[in-house]
Image: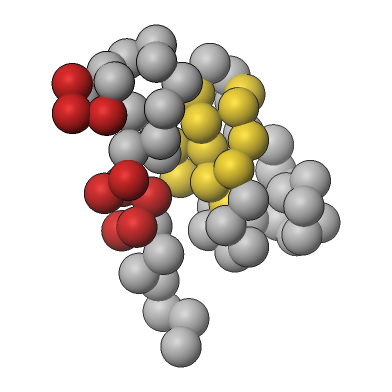
Amino acid sequence: MAVFKCNNCGNTIDVVTPPETCPSCKQVCEFVDVSCYIPECGGPGSGNINPQVFQESYKSDKK
């Protein structure tokens, strides 16, 4: 499984494939895979979130 983050509300979910509608904000959102794939945060299969990807996914056009 992977950790996906809703780029509308920031909710994270642990699923194989992200849903079309976010279970938290109930909107049709884009989900970003924020799973850790590098050794610095635990590597693949760790279930950890990559903090750099998580932070970057918040740099949307919301201001």
Q: What residue occupies the far top of the structure in this picture?
A: 45
Q: Position of residue 56 (x, y in %)?
A: 31, 58
Q: Residue 16 location in percent, x, y?
A: 58, 19
Q: Nearer the viewer, residue 54 or 42?
A: 42
Q: Residue at x 69, y 36 (%)?
A: 19
Residue 30, percent from left and from top: 55, 52
Q: Is residue 51 above or below residue 35?
A: below
Residue extending furthest left? 39
Q: Quadrant of residue 26?
A: bottom right
Q: For the point 71% across and 56% down, which residue is it?
A: 28
Identify which residue is drawn at 53% across, 37% down: 4
Report the front residue among 41 and 29. Answer: 41
Can see residue 7?
yes
Residue 48 higher or lower than 22, as above or below: above
Left of 16 or right of it: where is 33? left
40 with respect to 58 (left or right): left
In this picture, residue 33 sits left or right of residue 51: right
Q: Name the residue: 77% across, 52% down.
A: 24
Residue 41 is left or right of residue 5, and the answer is left
Q: Position of residue 40 (x, y in %)?
A: 18, 28
